[in-house]
Image (cartoon, rainbow, N blue to C red):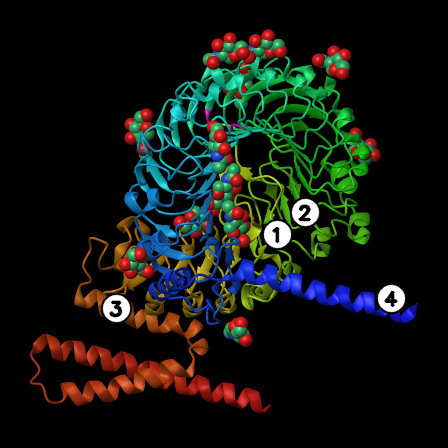
Amino acid sequence: MLVQAYNLMAHGFLLFLLFSCIISTNIHACKPTERSSLLSFASTLSSLHLNWTSIDCCRWKGITCDQDGWVTHLLLPSKGLKGGIPSSSLGNLTHLTHVNFSHNSLYGSLDTQFFMSLNRLEFLDLSYNLLSEELPLSLPSSNIRTVDLSSNHFHGAIPPSFFQQASNLTSFNVSNNTLTGYVPSSICLRHSSPFLRLLDFSSNAFSGNLAPGLGKCSELQVFRVGHNNLSGLLPEDIYNCTKLEEIALPLNFLHGTISDKIVNLTNLASLDLYYNHFDGELPLNLGKLSMLKFLTFDFNNLEGALPPSLMNCTNLVELRLGSNNLEGDISMLDFSRLSQLTKLDLRRNNFTGTIPRSLYSCRSVKAIGLSGNLLEGQIEDDILSLKSLSFLSLGYNRFTNLTGAMKMLMSCRSLHALMLGGSFVGEGMPSDDDMVDFHGFKNLRLLNLDDCQLTGQIPLWLSKLRNLEVLFLAYNQITGPIPSWLGTLPRLFYINLKDNRISGEFPKQLCRLPRLVYEPNIASQVEAFEIELPLTIGQNSNPTFLPHRLAYFAASLDLSNNNINGHIPAEIGQLQFLHKLALNSNNFSGIIPDQISNLKNLEVFNLSMNHLSGIIPLSLASLNFLKEFDVSYNSLEGPIPTSTQLQSFEASAFEGNLKLCGAPLPNKCSPNKGIDADNKNNKDMHNGLHQLPWFYMFTALGFIVGFWGVCGCLIFNKTWRYAYFRFIDNVQDRLLYMMIIVRINMMKRRT
Ligand SMILES: *[C@@H]1O[C@H](CO)[C@@H](O)[C@H](O)[C@H]1NC(C)=O
Ligand SMILES: *[C@@H]1O[C@H](CO)[C@@H](O)[C@H](O)[C@H]1NC(C)=O
Ligand SMILES: *[C@@H]1O[C@H](CO)[C@@H](O)[C@H](O)[C@H]1NC(C)=O
Ligand SMILES: *[C@@H]1O[C@H](CO)[C@@H](O)[C@H](O)[C@H]1NC(C)=O
Ligand SMILES: *[C@@H]1O[C@H](CO)[C@@H](O)[C@H](O)[C@H]1NC(C)=O
Ligand SMILES: *[C@@H]1O[C@H](CO)[C@@H](O)[C@H](O)[C@H]1NC(C)=O
Ligand SMILES: *[C@@H]1O[C@H](CO)[C@@H](O)[C@H](O)[C@H]1NC(C)=O
Ligand SMILES: *[C@@H]1O[C@H](CO)[C@@H](O)[C@H](O)[C@H]1NC(C)=O
Ligand SMILES: *[C@@H]1O[C@H](CO)[C@@H](O)[C@H](O)[C@H]1NC(C)=O
Ligand SMILES: *[C@@H]1O[C@H](CO)[C@@H](O)[C@H](O)[C@H]1NC(C)=O
Ligand SMILES: *[C@@H]1O[C@H](CO)[C@@H](O)[C@H](O)[C@H]1NC(C)=O
Ligand SMILES: *[C@@H]1O[C@H](CO)[C@@H](O)[C@H](O)[C@H]1NC(C)=O
């Protein structure tokens, strides 16, 4: 028995081997002509990633053959292919059905004749390459089903004959090119593409109306033409495409109302129309779209109240209706059925009432944006039942009891971004002692309490927010000093305290903000972090858009319009990653510290309207990124450093400094004035000179030697001699002084 069974198995095994051998030779017998076409293809493109060496080309990576040894699939995404499309070798692979060259560096044009010769092609993916020029005149054949030409550099209009043959096309993507002309709605008209399911024309430069015709694409599921230059109305027959699951037309100039017929699109899951000019009311029966998950309508001109039926869209995940003219009492709406809701954006409308209590039962909610409405009342502690709440924007309403709200929200562990600016007007800054001990706001990264006319001081509980990155406290009536602990918050890199009544000196400890001193690894940790809804600040009528990622905020220290006095500490030079430094309209006195030139990333620098004296340090000219510069209305003096980028700013950036001279100011530096200024300057310099590093000393020494070397050989005319002696005077003075300081410092260090 055993032996028989063994024999049977052995025979079976042999048979199996034989069989699989036959099959594999049948499948993988690469035709020599195909092999040479492939090799020719590979040799035309410089690619390091193809490893086509073995005999049987059907076993090569990315190649599939049919049973007769014809190559059918050429799937080479992300293989570093570089060069023009090798049409002659590809054209010889006459049995190709699947081609995928996405994410390579193919450039040049798609030649019409070659393209049409691929007459068995069914799938073509050339996305994410560098192809340019106009599209070929026609798609290859009636076999073609999927075409992805997205993310290339194609331009020009889509040729009228392009889709003529493509009677089996199901999916077409040309997004992210620079195509112009009309969106070819005719694609559906001739019954040419009855199977079309996906059309993506987004992110191009298509313009004009969306012509009727789409209605004939009865199988259409996804239709995207967002981010183009479309105008006009939505074509009525779009409501005939009852299989539509996604309509995305954001960032265009479309107008008109959304017809009630939209309720016929019962499969619709995503309706994305933000940033257009749509007006009128939302369709009354919108609630019949029971599959709807994403409704994004922000930045349009919608008016009227929210239709109560909206709350029948129980699958809603995102509801974004911000920046419209919507109104009505939202306290009455019953959100309790929207159990999937994660983002609600009703910002910048005219909604009234209180925060709907039913909203607190939407346990999936991560983001609530209600700012810029006419809402009133207090924040209720039911809000704490939203365990995932991460983004809360309630500013520019008529809410009251900030202290109550903050004490409550402190224990919301998931909260990342809290925007309350422009509400709670005229209340006191919450500052109870128990808030300090509570260690709340564990994960808060952004806090905005701008524009509330809050009184009181910068509160101590802020010192416990170890994850805080961005702090807005501008436009309040905050008094008292800037607390030195502010400089210890490990992630803080954006501070706006503008327009308050803050007094005292600039605390030196603020110059130790870790994120601005070390550009620590923290930055890379937080880089990917994205807030749930786009941020805007400011009033309804004139919102300022802020970046989606906190990491895109420019590192900033804005203390302008306060009563801060004393010197600008030399230590400020440590904040080397700062992009904006605004100290204007305060009472700062003393000199502009030379160390500011260490702030190599500085783009905005404003010291205007203070009492600063002395010269403008020459080293400031090394701040290459400066875009805004203002030192007007101080007591600065001497020549503006010449032949530097400082000359590229308007005279108004320097005006109001009576003793300042030279371009771009109209008053020239007269020689006498120059001497006066410089002499006086030296006295002023004594405040700041002790920070001048060795570097300057050696440069100065080197310069003197060089100067002697060159000038010693010249016969001086009067002006030269004059300039020379002035120069020596200055340098000798400074050198002498520096040596004394260096000695003193060395002695200090010894003791
Ligand atoms: C190339 O292919 C051969 C055989 O298929 C294999 O032995 C070799 O490791 C491959 N080389 C690379 C760099 O992948
Ligand atoms: C394509 O085939 C033709 C004729 O069959 C041949 O002359 C030509 O060399 C081939 N081209 C390539 C690149 O293999
Ligand atoms: C082409 O390959 C990429 C990467 O593997 C893949 O994501 C894409 O879906 C493929 N294209 C087609 C049309 O299958
Ligand atoms: C293309 O569509 C026609 C009908 O319009 C059909 O007969 C044919 O089989 C289809 N071809 C492919 C490759 O699907
Ligand atoms: C079209 O291609 C782009 C990439 O270029 C992709 O992001 C987009 O999702 C595609 N469209 C559809 C509807 O799949
Ligand atoms: C658009 O195409 C460019 C290259 O042309 C690419 O870098 C970018 O990632 C694409 N954008 C999207 C959203 O796919
Ligand atoms: C957008 O379309 C309008 C007309 O509809 C045209 O005047 C304008 O030049 C277009 N803009 C771009 C960037 O194509
Ligand atoms: C939409 O469909 C209806 C009924 O199916 C039909 O009567 C109407 O003509 C179609 N409209 C368009 C513009 O195709
Ligand atoms: C909408 O659907 C109803 C019934 O399902 C139908 O009578 C009507 O013609 C449809 N409207 C359009 C525009 O297709
Ligand atoms: C919501 O749907 C229910 C049935 O599912 C229906 O009775 C009710 O009238 C609908 N509400 C609105 C406002 O359309
Ligand atoms: C709110 O209503 C007032 C008065 O009705 C109107 O002036 C204002 O433009 C509206 N604001 C918005 C954002 O709709
Ligand atoms: C403010 O809110 C707190 C907490 O909800 C509450 O205890 C307090 O009574 C409120 N104060 C006023 C004046 O309503």
User: Which disc number belongs to residue 529?
Assistant: 1
> For this view, does 702 lie left or right of residue 465?
left
Magenta-drawn segment? 272-276
- How many residues crowd around disc 1 within 10 Å: few (fewer than 14), some, or many (20 or more)? few
Q: Using the numbered discs, state the Cα–Cα distance from disc 4 to disc 1 in whole angstroms.
A: 64 Å
User: Which disc number belongs to residue 5?
Assistant: 4
Amino acid type at circle 1 is: Phe
Q: Using the numbered discs, state the Cα–Cα distance from disc 1 to disc 3 in whole angstroms.
A: 55 Å
Amino acid type at circle 4 is: Ala
- How many residues crowd around disc 2 within 10 Å: few (fewer than 14), some, or many (20 or more)? many
Amino acid type at circle 3 is: Asp
Q: Earlier in the sequence, mark 3 or mark 4?
A: 4
User: Which disc number belongs to residue 416?
Assistant: 2
Q: Main secondary structure of the magenta part?
A: loop
Residue drawn at point x = 51 percent, y = 29 percent: 195
In terms of secondary structure, where does tag 3 sit? helix
The answer to whether mark 2 and mark 1 are in CB contact below 8 A is: yes
Can you give x and y, in whole percent of width and height, for residue 179 in the image? 34, 37
Whether 384 is drawn above or below 358: the answer is below
Can you give x and y, in whole percent of width and height, for residue 750 in the image? 57, 91
Residue drawn at point x = 71 percent, y = 28 percent: 315
Residue 23 visible to an observer of this rendering: yes
